[in-house]
Amino acid sequence: MIGTLGSLLPAPLVAAVGQVGEGFFHERSSDTLPCQAQPGHLFCFDWAREHIDRFEKPALQQLELVVLSVLLGFVVAFALALIAHRKHWLRPPLLAVTGVLYTIPSIAFFFLLLPLTGFGRDTAIIVLAAYTLQIIYRNTMVGLAKVPASVKDAARGMGLTDRQILWRVEIPLATPEIIAGLRIATVSTVAIATLAVFIQAGGLGTQIYGSGNLTFPTVVIIAGAIGMLMAFAFDLMLLGVQRLTTPWRRAVVT
Amino acid sequence: MPEARAADDTRSQPSASSVRYDGVSKRYGDSATVAVDDLTLEVPAGDICVLVGPSGCGKTTAMRMVNRTVEMTEGDILIGERSVRDREPAQLRREIGYVIQQIGLFPHRTITQNIGAVPQLLGWKKERIRARSAELLELIGLDPELGDRYPTQLSGGQQQRVGVARALAADPLVMLMDEPFGAIDPINRERLQNEFLRLQAQVRKTVLFVTHDIDEAIKMGDRIAVMREHGRVEQYATPAELLMAPATEFVEDFVGADRALKRLALMRVADINLWEAPLAYVGQATGEVRAKLARPDVEVPYALLVDSERRPLGWLSARDLTGDTVPARADSPLGPVLDRDDIMRDALADLLQGEAQYAPVTDHEGRIDGVLSVEIISEFLASPEAKSDEHSAVERPHSGENLA
């Protein structure tokens, strides 16, 4: 999984960062002192060019964390939403539970799980997935609630079974809201995943918080930029999916 | 009635079934709330039966129990010979067309896909669905190009036409229509009503049609069930019977004080005894015409100028008849000319609008048939003869091409 994803996305991202840096900071790199040694130097291109490789593995890890946790979160939240859609009495408690999960401070959440699942990727994915539940669950519920009663009535009257109404009518019509939820969840997960470093799950956080890098901004900037690009790419991709799956929303009213 | 129609039905197989309510009740909760109480009603195959009544009278509930979107608590409903209770609800519904006021087209499906929804559920082949959709688009008079559009791209009237087409797609035995034209503006509503009647003349479905509008009921129904609370049927009759002999005070009130006028909507000009106008042919000797006018039993005091084919040209004044022969042109304009098949209500409107007391009535070739006057209509409305059903046996919607 890591291999296939890695070969698809992060390499161009990393390269893109390198290209942006080149033109911008070329002048400073000609100083006699290596810029790493100059305090207060914002961005050191020489260093960046030499060390860009070291971001590849953290970026891949980050990507893996985001993809797996959003997928897990989506499966769980979507399933919860479908259950709550049928059993109305489950709605308040589910909203409360996912809401409480969402309010736990992230680092605390990581450490709370340590005794149960230990250090590493799995713990990170569980925590990150838990954070996506609230948004995906709530957006799915909103999307399902927005399906007009008349459309459901007509569907039922025409002889669609409850299951057919759900999968052929309600879910397709709720798709815009569901994907909107996924977009928010994914973007915020990219950000929170940088904290996974504290439970030794890797990711871009290793470059930001790891080994005293905070005193050397170049590393933080590159890691941050990769994170931003990653979030942006995910958002754009999901927007594309949304548009492809809902052609009727773009139909021009004449 | 259905037997008589079957004779000129060109379809090879029966495509409509009778619907029979047999002591049907619907109670909610601990039988405290009774929506429909012991309803018994039979709708012959191929008829439009309108359930009409004030809101909350249970008419929609009564209709919805047919396709089991509301489950009855007692009694039985038979479609043809089969009880709906024995059927799996989803399967049953696929054989019953369903049209609702809010239309409920699938916003995420194209018009073609919407129309093909039930055939798709029934497992028809793609080609057949596509052909059927195209056929129905044509039947409801929509441009085939609209087939690839989404519902939001259509007007309300067009959407409801698609709603009707979708209900007809799998050639259902029965159609349920719940205030189908209620949300459409008055002008388009009338057009849609006429179109549906024309459509019905071709497809001849058994239709249960719910409305709270008595005028719509009279226009659309072969039979009308006037309901009051708990689905109690106050009267179940043809529109003419309902207007002429309301069974109860409730029906009388519901039908309204203007029911005499409403009766005219059920009649055609040909159904009434017209007056005979003294005819004057171009070139005829005026003496003959004057003699006709002088007869004591003359019904119309003016001579009607006609050509050699007996097509009316105008009304002759006394001055026109002073010469030796009848002139080729009349002094007074012809005014409104009516067709034998005009609806009486429209004919009266034409008379009033044209400020005419008399109007010539012509047949399909435009030849004079007689003269209709305001007096004939008012006498008809006042006469006991009007109370007899026989006289106004207007062809109901099945010959609806002239209702438009």
Image (cartoon, coloured by chain):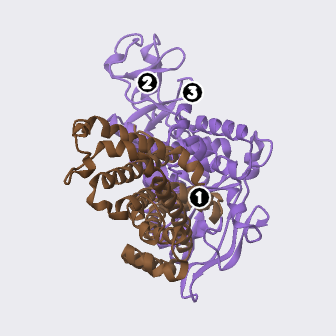
Q: Amino acid at mark 3?
A: His
User: Do pointers 3 and 2 mark residues of a single chain?
Assistant: yes
Q: Write down the residue under mark 1.
A: A155
Q: Colour of chain B?
A: purple
Discs 2, 1 touching: Cβ within 8 Å: no
Q: Residue A149's x, y, as percent? A: 49, 63
User: Dot 3 falls on which chain?
Assistant: B
Q: In the image, B121: left or right of A34?
A: right
Q: Please tell me whether mark 3 sits on a helix, a strand or a loop.
A: loop
Q: Which mark is residue B37?
A: none
Amino acid type at image mark 1: Ala
Q: CA distance from mark 2 to mark 1?
A: 61 Å
Tag 2 residue? B304
* Circles 1, 3 touching at the beta carbon (< 8 Å): no
Which color was chain A given? Answer: brown
- Answer with mark 3 or mark 2, whichever residue precedes in sequence: 2
- Mark-to-mark CA distance, 3 and 2: 19 Å
Q: Is residue A164 above or below residue A81?
A: above
Location of residue A201 in the rendering, given as x and y in whole percent from the top left corner: 48, 66
Residue pointed to by mark 3: B364
Local crowd size for mark 3, using a 10 Å CA cut-off: few (<14), some (14–19), many (≥20): few
From the viewer's perspective, is residue B316 above or below residue B323? below
Q: Residues within 10 Å of mark 2 (few under 14, many from 20)?
A: many
Residue B213 at what x, y percent from top left?
45, 59
